[in-house]
Each structure stands twice: as C-alpha cells, then as structure tokens.
Image (cartoon, rainbow, N blue to C red):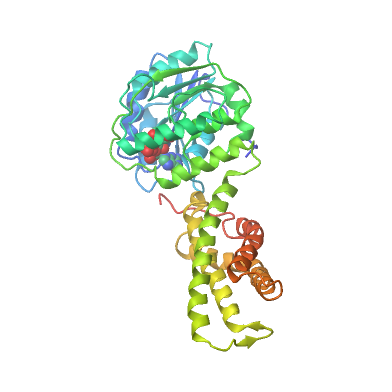
C-alpha cells in the first residue's frame, strides 16, 4: 500500500481543507450531509470528496447531481474495494487540500463540531484535531453496550498510542498533510478505525486538539458497524502493538484457526466415541487403523470447511466471496489446503501409532503444524484479486 497515485491537477485554486466522506448506501442522507457541512464551512476554502464503494443505492447519483452546482464536491467510486479506513485513505491520497479530514456520510457528525475542527487545524499550531465523545459529560449518542464497548476499546488503544486521545474511535478528525504523509507508509487500511490507524502508524508525536461532540442520529440507512468491526480493531491493535510483526490479517486468520481447532477436536472426539465403539476389532487399511483414517480425515475436512466460511466472513471480509465465486473459492481453498491436509493426516497417524501419543494430542499438533502452510496457500489462491459485488 505504499504506492501513491499522482494527483491530477485541480480545477481551481488549491483548497485549504479536503474533507473526505466515505459512503456505503447513504443515498438517503448524503445530499443533505454535504449541503449542511459545506454551508457551515463556507468561510473556509474546502473541497468535499465522497469515496463511495459502488453503493447499490443512489448515493453516487446524488453526489454527482450535487456536484453540478457545487464545484468543490468530488466523487470517487471504488469498484473492487470495501472498508471505511481504506476508503478514507483513498480520499486523502487524491485530495488537493493542505489539511485533510474525514467525517461520516450519514449525518451523525455535527457540522458545528466540524467547523470548530476546521478553524482549529487552520490556525496552524496543531497536527491533528479530533471530535471526541468523551470530553466532559457529553452524551455519546450510543446505546449502553456500545458505549461500554467503545470506552473499553478506548482504554485498550491507549496502550499502543503516542497521543492521549480521549476518543481514538472517533470517525471525525482533521490533520495536516505532513502528519498524514508521516503515517501513510505504515497505514493498515483494515476496518473502521481510521484515526487509530493514522495515530498508531505515524512516528510523529502530534500536537493535538479535541472538540467535544456527541453523535447525532443517523439519517436513514443502516450502521455498518458490527462484531466484525470489533474483531478488526483487535487485530489492528495487535499489529500496531507488535510494530507490524504480527500482521492484522494474520491475527484474524489465526483467531479463526483457533475456533477451527475446537471444531476439529469436537469431530475427532465424536468420531472416536462412535467408531471405536462400533468396531470391536481394529480394521486395518494400509498399516493404519481404518477408523483412525476416517476420523482424522473427517475432522480435517470439516474444520477446513468451517475455517473457509468463517474466514470469508471475518478475515477476508473486505474481499468477501459470494455465489459462484464462493463455490470456486471453496474448491480453490480445498485444492490449496490439500497438501496441508495430507501432511496433517500423515503426521497424526504417525504420532499416534509410532510415537504412541494420545489420538487427540496427535491430531491437534498435526493440524497446527499444517496450518502455517494453509495460511499462505489460502491467501495466495482463494481471496486473491477478488471483486466484491456492488453494494453488498
Ligand atoms: N466507502 C465506504 N466503504 N464507506 C463505508 C463502508 C465501506 O465499506 N462502511 C461504512 N462506510 C461509511 C458509511 O456509509 C458511513 O458514512 C460511515 O462510513 C460510517 O459508517 P456507519 O455504518 O454509520 O458507522 P457507525 O456510525 O456505526 O460508526 C461511526 O461511529 C463510530 C464511533 O462509534 C464511524 O465514524 C466509526 O469510525 C466510529 O468509530
Ligand atoms: Mn453512523
């Protein structure tokens, strides 16, 4: 992600501020959101760049319609990518402004807070300014559990950040171009937490400011934040805490792998109970017991299939496979993992029969050893060059 496209020449004079709005199906709100914020910022030269991930609704059409009368409004549609953070990065990469910001496209961010942020960053004595829900007693606008979750995440992120941000989960902030460029080479771009990504990726300790702001109700549409966003955050934190040694996607993949081990162990135990009870005499095929071969194979196959589907939902969410691509992806995944599966089966049988290790310990050890291979194989084969469906 270090390659940055050259920015085409701007039509007018360079704006002071470029404000990015990322959208996925925000047709109901986007027009009034842009009008409201642009009017609030009318004393500041600014452009607004909407980065839309090929929404299935009329989001892009609404923005183009508005751009007819407002030349400071730009639209960038991404067809093959997904994700709030990577969309914001795209917007900043193509922005003309001296200062760069981001806000939501659903009307939840208060334009007045955005005006305060803009005025603060334009003064020139700050590198980063953020809207925060947690200064003083501001009503956060979140339900009890989301509020609790958000505060817990804030605490966890405090451990990896150089800046004492009171709301590192904020989706509304502005920064200087220099500060952005200092973070740019290391940005992960995964998930929703773009402020955290920026602040944790920059080696610079920024001069920062905060503005108090509660979230307003979203105008139509639906929130895209869910459990997977929280998992992404955990993975991002681990990547930043380990200085990039543990890549965020690998952390997610490994987490899914752990659930796969449980599936694997459960299948093995069930097979062991059923098959060993049914056959009094051990049945041999080659030199190994038939029931061992069946139970290890079944456990490998079922846990592999489990891992494929859960990885598709979580680890490779931004490249999620659907329909025919899901079937071909699964076949590709089986193909890619087949070598790992054979290694796992052979190792299990060997450890159990020749080293006399307990069947479960033998199976799990073998599965773990072959999983490193599977990570590379699946990254290379199944989710490579994947194009998401529009608006899905
Ligand atoms: N381009 C693009 N691609 N935009 C997206 C995507 C995506 O995959 N997913 C979400 N968005 C856009 C939405 O259309 C919206 O404009 C904005 O990103 C925020 O998404 P919401 O779905 O409204 O998120 P939220 O309100 O739950 O979360 C917001 O508040 C959180 C604080 O609790 C965001 O600002 C988060 O960043 C913030 O942490
Ligand atoms: Mn929202």
Up-down: is 156 above or below 303?
A: above
Looking at the picture, how far across and down is residue 2, in whole percent? Answer: 65, 37
Looking at the picture, how far across and down is residue 134, in whole percent? Answer: 38, 24
Left or right of 45? Residue 218 is left
Number of residue marks: 0
User: Which residue is rendered at x = 55% and y = 68% of the image?
Assistant: 331
Looking at the picture, how far across and down is residue 179, in whole percent? Answer: 58, 22
Left or right of 247? Residue 89 is left
Q: Is residue 311 visible?
A: yes
Looking at the picture, how far across and down is residue 142, in whole percent? Answer: 32, 34
Up-down: is 343 above or below 244?
A: below
> Which image quarter is the N terminus in?
top right
Q: Can residue 64 be seen in this view?
A: no
Q: Observer-nearest residue: 204 or 390?
A: 204
- Dividing the picture into quadrants, the one containing residue 371 is bottom right
Left or right of 289? Residue 54 is left
- Dividing the picture into quadrants, the one containing residue 357 is bottom right
């Amino acid at each position: 992600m270090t390659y940055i496209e050259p920015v085409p020449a701007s039509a007018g004079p360079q704006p002071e501020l470029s404000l990015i709005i990322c959208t996925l199906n925000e047709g109901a709100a986007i027009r009034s959101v842009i009008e409201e914020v642009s009017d609030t910022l009318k004393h500041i030269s600014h452009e607004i760049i909407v980065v839309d991930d090929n929404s299935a609704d009329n989001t892009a059409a609404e923005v183009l319609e508005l751009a007819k009368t407002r030349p400071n409004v730009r639209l960038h549609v991404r067809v093959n990518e997904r994700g709030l953070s990577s969309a914001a990065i795209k917007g900043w990469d193509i922005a003309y402004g001296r200062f760069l910001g981001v806000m939501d496209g659903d009307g939840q961010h208060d334009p007045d807070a955005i005006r305060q942020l803009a005025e603060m960053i334009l003064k020139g004595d700050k590198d980063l300014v953020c809207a925060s829900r947690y200064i003083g007693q501001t009503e956060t606008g979140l339900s009890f559990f989301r509020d609790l979750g958000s505060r817990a995440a804030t605490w966890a992120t405090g451990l990896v950040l150089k800046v004492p941000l009171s709301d590192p989960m904020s989706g509304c902030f502005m920064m200087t171009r220099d500060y952005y460029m200092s973070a740019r080479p290391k940005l992960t771009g995964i998930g929703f937490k773009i402020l955290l990504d920026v602040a944790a990726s920059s080696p610079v300790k920024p001069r920062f400011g905060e503005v108090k702001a509660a979230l307003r109700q979203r105008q139509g549409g639906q929130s895209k934040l869910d459990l997977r966003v929280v998992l992404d955050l955990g993975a991002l934190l681990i990547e930043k805490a380990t200085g990039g040694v543990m890549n965020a996607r690998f952390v997610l993949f490994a987490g899914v792998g752990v659930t796969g081990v449980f599936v694997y162990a459960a299948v093995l135990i069930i097979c062991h109970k059923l098959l060993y009870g049914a056959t009094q005499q051990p049945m041999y095929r080659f030199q190994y017991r038939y029931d061992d071969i069946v139970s290890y194979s079944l456990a490998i196959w079922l846990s592999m299939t489990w891992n494929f589907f859960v990885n598709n939902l979580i680890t490779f969410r931004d490249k999620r496979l659907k329909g025919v691509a899901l079937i071909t992806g699964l076949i590709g995944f089986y193909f890619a993992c087949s070598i790992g599966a054979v290694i796992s089966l052979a190792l299990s049988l060997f450890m159990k029969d020749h080293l006399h290790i307990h069947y479960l310990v033998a199976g799990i050890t073998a599965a773990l050893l072959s999983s490193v291979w599977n990570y590379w194989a699946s990254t290379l084969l199944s989710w490579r060059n994947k194009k998401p469906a529009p608006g899905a």
